[in-house]
Image (spheres, helix red, strand yellow):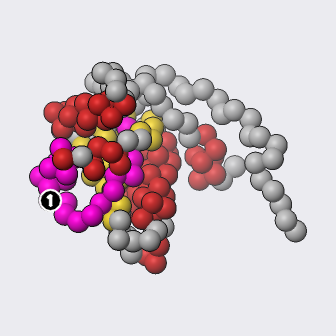
Amino acid sequence: MNETLNVLETRRSVRGFDPERIPSDELIEQVVRAGEYAPTGRGMQSPRIVVVTNKAVRDKLSQLNAEVMGVESDPFYGAPVITLVLADRSRPTYIYDGSLVMGNLMNAAHAVGLGSCWIHRAHEVFDSVEGKLLLASWGIEGDYEGIGHVALGYALKEPAEAKPRKDDYTVWVK
């Protein structure tokens, strides 16, 4: 099977990361580069990717995300690296553009041997006062919406096999 197709078929969400095994900057850069090459409306490259490897900032993001959920547990499943995807609300395709970046990040992570999981609530976190202050502290200005976080790292265990695809997933019109 084609290597790319194999990656697409075998990638699974990881919900348990080894917090002690930190991916190398080189691996993270490969994942992020794939995100940068995601298709965007009219090729405008409007999303922004934020890579968080600083533990204190990672933990702050976890706390803010948990507050949105109303829990005290770590919504990032112990992942030591968090990539955040933001998209410029002024672009009519911003949600799609950001979602494609998210997909590329997760597929690339799997291709280089890392686990990943899409974590929601970035919208709420970065629409909050604290979230906006974080963006400003990172030099990100503009009307950006948080599309999602990608929890990134080494899986504690192999993810389960994929469920069979449903029979009516695809409809052919010939």
22 lies left or right of 96 = left
Q: Nearer the viewer, residue 166 or 34?
A: 166
Q: Write down the quadrant of residue 61 in the picture.
A: top left
Measured as percent of width and height from the top left, residue 98 is found at 42, 58
- Report the span colored magenta: 130-151
Q: Secondary structure at mark 1?
A: loop
Name the quadrant containing residue 89: bottom left
Horizontal relation, residue 147 to residue 82: left or right:
right
The spot of residue 15 in percent (x, y) is: 46, 28
Q: Position of residue 161 (x, y in %)?
A: 64, 29
Q: Is residue 7 magenta?
A: no
Residue sticking out furthest to the right:
174
Using the rendered image of the protein, determine whether residue 38 is visible from the camera's viewpoint.
no
Residue type (three-letter) at the residue carrying disc 1? Gly
The residue at the point 29 percent across, 31 percent down is 67
Left or right: where 7 falls relative to 28: right
- At x 28%, y 24%, the residue is 20
